[in-house]
Amino acid sequence: MKLIESVPNFSEGRREEIVRQIIEEASKYPKVKVLDWSMDKDHNRSVVTLVGEPEQVLNALFDMTKKAAELIDLRYHKGEHPRMGATDVIPLVPLIGTTMQECVEWSKQLGKRIGEELGIPVYLYERSATRPERENLSEIRKGEFEGFFEKIKDPKWKPDFGPDRVHETAGVTAVGAREFLIAFNVNLGTNNIEIADKIAKAVRHISGGYRYVKAMGVELKEKGIVQVSMNLTNYKKSPIFRVFETIKREAARYGVPVVGSEIIGMVPLQAIVDTFAWYLQIDDFGTNRVIEERLLNELTKEE
């Protein structure tokens, strides 16, 4: 059995009917399962988690990208989260019976098809990157949709696939293979975006923070608060609990409380177990002590 995961991000988080039409494209493939999807009005962004047989996952992702290009017009899109495409990013993650190198090759196949058949410029990122400056998604995304019309003229930013011009309404898309990522956000009891920016700067790697953390400050206008929005690109080396405690301590410096947190999409059981064990100071605790996990393993042995 070969299984991969993909977590495509779409630049629409306010019109549920649009998001549902995009997700519906995956239902045409029996060996693809939509495990989770979420919308965020402030970010104006949706995140979908798919798992399935590689070939069908690639076909589903292509169809979802095509549908997003038909329904989303970035000329009228505004949100707190940086974006450059209607389908902003498509990561491929190896799960069962698959390798990172296979995901790299599949990302190239998908990127080539999107570029040639949909006329959307595609940039390969993370493990699939063809140039060092393209490994980090935030570097590719700099300038966002509006700035890409000029950026793409620079030979340094010639797309890996597709035309050398930005798609008028769907922008550009990043496709790549990567490790499992946790989208983890921490909400602060203030509406001062400068505080969120300072805390994000303290924890993110690019400005001296944790090696596997990407972070930025975001305004949640509907709630009247701000947020430290993060991607944890290696939860084993930069664990959730350590990052969370650092944010709490940094927030305390400014007299600001942490009022909540959220995980976007799915999360590995091991990350939850590690956090549980750390906060309760339990020695020698692992997934083998989780009854559902143990039961699943026993049932699998019997098949």
Image (cartoon, rainbow, N blue to C red):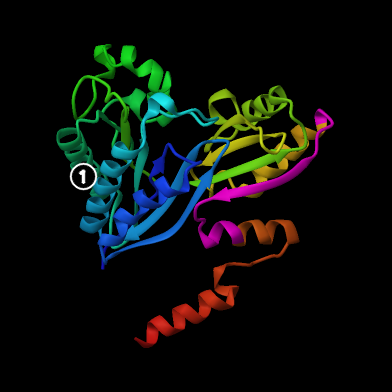
Q: Position of residue 143 (x, y in %)?
A: 42, 18
Toward the viewer: 247 or 24? 24
Residue, far right: 255
- Give the amino acid at mark 1: Glu
Q: Quadrant of residue 130?
A: top left
Q: Position of residue 255 (x, y in %)?
A: 84, 31
Instruction: Name the residue rendered at 35%, 18% in the picture.
Output: 148
**Tag 1 residue:** 105
Q: Position of residue 174 (x, y in %)?
A: 33, 34
Residue 260's place in the image compared with 157, above or below, is below
Question: Which quarter of the image is occupied by the C terminus?
Answer: bottom left
Question: Which quarter of the image is occupied by the N terminus?
Answer: bottom left
Residue 60's place in the image compared with 124, above or below, is below
Residue, far bottom: 302
Q: Quadrant of residue 217?
A: top right
Classify mark 1: helix, strand or loop: helix
Toward the viewer: 62 or 235? 62
Circle 1 crowding by C-alpha within 10 Å: few under 14, some 14–19, many from 20: some
The magenta stretch spans which residues?
253-272
